[in-house]
Amino acid sequence: MRIKTTSVLVLTWGHDTLHVAQATAHGGRYRIKQSATYGIPEGLGLDDPETLGQGLHEFLRKERLTSKHAIVGIPARWLVAKTVTLPPTNPDHVRGILEIQAEQCFSLGLQELVYNYSGIPKSDQSSQILLVAMQRSRIDQLKTILKAAHLNALSIVPMAAATAALAEGSRQVCGVFAQNGHAEYVMAQQGTLSQIKHVTTSVSQSDPDSMATDLQRLLLLAGRSQDAGMDLVVWSPATDDAALNPLRLRLGQEITVHNGRSALEAAGQIAPDPDTAADYQAAALLAGYQRAETPMLDFLHSHLATKPHKNRGRLVFWAVSAVLIGLLGIAAVYGMWAQDRRDIAQFQLQIEDNQVPLRQATELRDRLKLANNWYTGRATYLDALDRLTTLFPETGDIWITNLSFQDDGTAAIVGDALDRPSVLRVLEAMEDSDRFTDITTHYLDEVGKDTQEISFAIRFKIIKP
């Protein structure tokens, strides 16, 4: 999306910091010339946006970051996402259908969340849409901060979503943003997101074997088919292209590993000079923002927001006409009101009497809707979990560290064992069970050279009773 200013601030949120990078247009590209990190004072946070915004304003003035336009990058931990299936839909009906889907997918009400989506609704066939929500109160807090800091917000977008905008070709792309103690990853294809998530995993950059194991676990839990080819973009300023070669050997030929820095430079939309990890992330966000035809999951200008009426001339005409008609008929209306005011008062009393039963019925409906999805699939998943538990010995030779279930009945377990025979005995027990099928070993590797301990991942399907 084209930026119409000569300079722009890119604000990226950390756990207790706010990094600000100022980019200036030069020769059709934006180059980051100056940056600084605002350490949010202890005890001050989003709950006091006015004070936080005033502190940010003083910080920008002190650091001489002078641009008044800002793109705000938000972390994935602020979001909730759900993949939904849309039937063949007229574009004019997409907003209403997704509102119904959102009410079923998320526990909070429509008035408490701001929604956006990634995907292309189709009129001739069903389509997969990633529905993403963020608390409306958090958006209001960000607006208050920017206003107090005297900044004009251009967009509020997830930082990790830039990967989808920088993706080329038709292959599936997974972008991993490595952080200290956690990571954010997105799955995308042809600029359309299918997943966005915050996970607590180290994704160690210093140990390629450990990094490969972490990434394999992420891809497995994301539900990616082992045989499907894809591009993996690792965003990390501390990892050069040569350091990714051991990772390429571990992941195999089906996954093409790219360095995020190379993908950023290949985009051709920005010439970054990042000095820090935060500068690098800001450069990636700005590049993705420029490359996308529309901002990726912009919560300031959502696709689902009600569009304003553009024909102001017609609106003024009808408004003036309504005023004139009102003036001509005011006497008659007043007389009718005087005659019917007793009936109106009676109707108001009836409405007030019905408020309590209506509120109770609404609360009961919401509770039933929230519990419905659990009880629909409860027996199948609990029975499968119970059967899986009996297959693992109580001796402590093997244990599970991660377990995931997909809506289609596919499941995956990740764990460790003291030795390889312990894993093989569990595999044999699963194959003999009448509750599991399509059992495949995703990986079965030794944890280190000086130990026999094994790290494994198993993928399977649940047979419904």
Image (cartoon, rainbow, N blue to C red):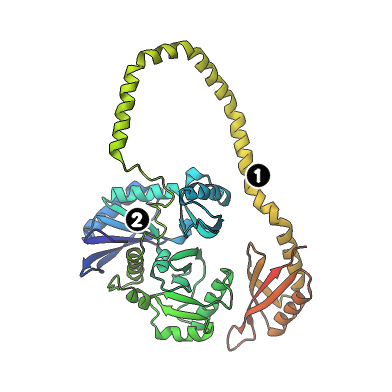
Name the residue rendered at 44%, 75% in the picture.
233
Left or right of 278, for residue 357: right
Q: Nearer the viewer, residue 250 or 2?
A: 2
Amino acid at circle 2 = Ser
Amino acid at circle 1 = Leu
Q: Nearer the viewer, residue 417 or 251?
A: 251
**Looking at the rendered structure, which numbered label has been put on residue 229?**
none
Label 1 packing within 10 angstroms: few (<14), some (14-19), many (20+): few
| Quadrant in which residue 361 is drawn | top right
Quadrant containing the C terminus is: bottom right
Q: Nearer the viewer, residue 126 or 432?
A: 126
Label 2 packing within 10 angstroms: few (<14), some (14-19), many (20+): many
Name the residue rendered at 56%, 68% in the picture.
222
Residue 138 position within the rendered picture, expressed as x and y whole percent measured from the top left = 42, 50
Residue 375 position within the rendered picture, expressed as x and y whole percent measured from the top left = 70, 52
| Quadrant in which residue 455 is drawn | bottom right
Pointer 1 or 2: first along the chain? 2
**Looking at the rendered structure, which numbered label has been put on residue 368?**
1
Name the residue rendered at 31%, 27% in the picture.
321
Vertical order, 416 against 360 (above or below): below
Quadrant containing the N terminus is: bottom left
Vertical order, 267 against 241 (above or below): above
**Looking at the rendered structure, which numbered label has been put on residue 155?**
2
Q: CA distance from mark 1 to mark 2?
A: 37 Å
Name the residue rendered at 55%, 78% in the picture.
213
Residue 247 position within the rendered picture, expressed as x and y whole percent measured from the top left = 49, 83
Tell which residue pokes out farthest to the bottom in this image.
449
SS at mark 2? strand
SS at mark 1? helix
